[in-house]
Amino acid sequence: MTLFLARLAGAQIGSQIGSQIDTSSIAPHRYLVLYRNATIPGDAESRVASAGAHLTRRNEHFGIAAVESTVPEDDASTLRRLTAQPNVDYVLHDRIVSAHRLRLQSVTPASVGVNITGQAPNPSTPIGRLPTHGTILTTLPSLPSAPPPPPYDTYYTNTPQGWAVQQVGGYGNNVPGGPAHGPWDTTMGKGVRIAIIDSGVDQTHPDIAPNLALNLTEVDQSAYPSPCDDGTPQDQQGHGTWTASLAAAAIGPGTGQVIGVAPAATILNIKVLQRMPAAISGASNLANQCTAGEASGLLSWVMQGIEDAIANRADVISLSIGATADLTTGDGAGLLAAFNRITYAATQANIVLVASAGNDGFDLSNPRYVELPAQSRGVVAIVASTNPSCAQNVTPGAACTPGPVTLPYYSNYGAPLNALAAPGGM
């Protein structure tokens, strides 16, 4: 588990991919109601209806209800009516959560031949019929030798791409590519359940499928539709698959090319983001917009995802989301209160929550601002550290040379984070 926590920085910060809550982007007519004592009243549905809205989700672990307004009126009036109801602490706008686009390019080793199209039958060959004439063979024909088994784990065993995994202790148990003995002699994460709350995972990926035990989606396209995603648990953007592979990509024959920090851990896929079309100036082709798009979803989906992680006995929750909240605003203070309530409930269920500290280069020493959920109650915040084999040098065209491990320029920082550092950068 510890290995996974450290490696998360590479997934979220080192590759400079992550999700953020855009605090200027709200979901119209949708709200989150936080009730006192973290308890949703039994008659909450009728109370919400009296305010001209209807309750769409009850998150009992957190005492938070998702609500949609049914009255076409100004936003301030709806907020005022909901806030005035008994036992309500806060009413917040539901918000749109967006993930930076992850660009993936297939890499095929030169020594491996891959047939991705299949071979069309010879049109002159009768299909489904036995031959009626020709030479009768009296000896077995000479058959070609069986092809070698496909390579596996080569990015870890034969390239520098496994540096971050090894840097945090992902080695041992006589696995080629790293020191023969180390933490993997003791454990590879077997029995640990890691909830990936993200854009889903590719359930057919050879590094994901062996460890995948749960496929859920919180996506409700009636609330936030997308022409680029079908809303199923399958990852249609790439971000969640990447994060899951860094945490727990499987090891051994028949798997993919990478090894995760905890390669025997169990993956719980809880999809809360869907691929959305990109806003490309002058572009009218939906296919191009979807290709360039990133994953987005609603904050209420993330909240439901954490509740389902609790219900499915997660040991670790990966939250590749983050936003800087201004505590001098009502919404900023409400967001902190909401996240504190959610993350505390998860820690009370003995779950370790891990979140990126963010990659905006912000100094969070100013108490006016907090990074969420990294600075939420009970969350382990992770800042990035650089690759000692490739010292940070932002000069264009700079060569990769060894150097000291430092905080990279893009990572958020500041003592209030109380963060751990783990490999990021390249």
Image (tube, rainbow, N blue to C red):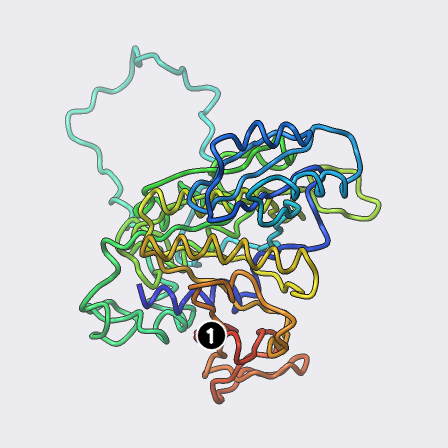
Front residue of 42 and 17? 42
Q: Residue at x 68, y 57 (%)?
A: 330
Instruction: Find residue 328 and report its horizontal and vertical position in percent.
Output: 69, 66
Number of numbered discs on residues: 1
The answer to which of 326 and 249 lies nearer the viewer is: 326
Q: Residue 331: x and y, percent?
A: 67, 55
The answer to whether any part of residue 248 appears in the image is no
Residue at horizontal 58 percent and vertical 43 percent from the top: 33
Q: What residue type is labelled 1?
A: Ala
Q: Which residue is at the front of the view, 129 or 306?
A: 306
User: Which quarter of the figure has residue 54?
Assistant: top right
Residue 391 lies, with reference to residue 5, above or below; the image says below
Residue 213, compared with residue 122, is above or below; it is below
Q: In this view, does 209 lie above or below 262?
A: above
Camera sees residue 292: yes
- View extreme (right): residue: 282
Badge 1 crowding class, 10 Å Cα cut-off, few under 14, some 14 to 19, many 20 or more, is many
Q: In which quarter of the image is the N terminus?
A: bottom left
* Label 1 sits on residue: 419
Quarter of image, res 121 = top left
Horizontally, residue 97 falls left or right of residue 135, namely right
- The residue sitting at 34% across, 64% down in the picture is 261
Residue at (21, 64) in percent of width and height: 187
Please name whichever residue, 218 or 238, is drawn nearer the observer in this view of the structure.
218
- In the picture, measured across the screen, residue 103 lies left or right of residue 345, that is right
- Looking at the picture, how far across and down is residue 134, in whole percent? 29, 17
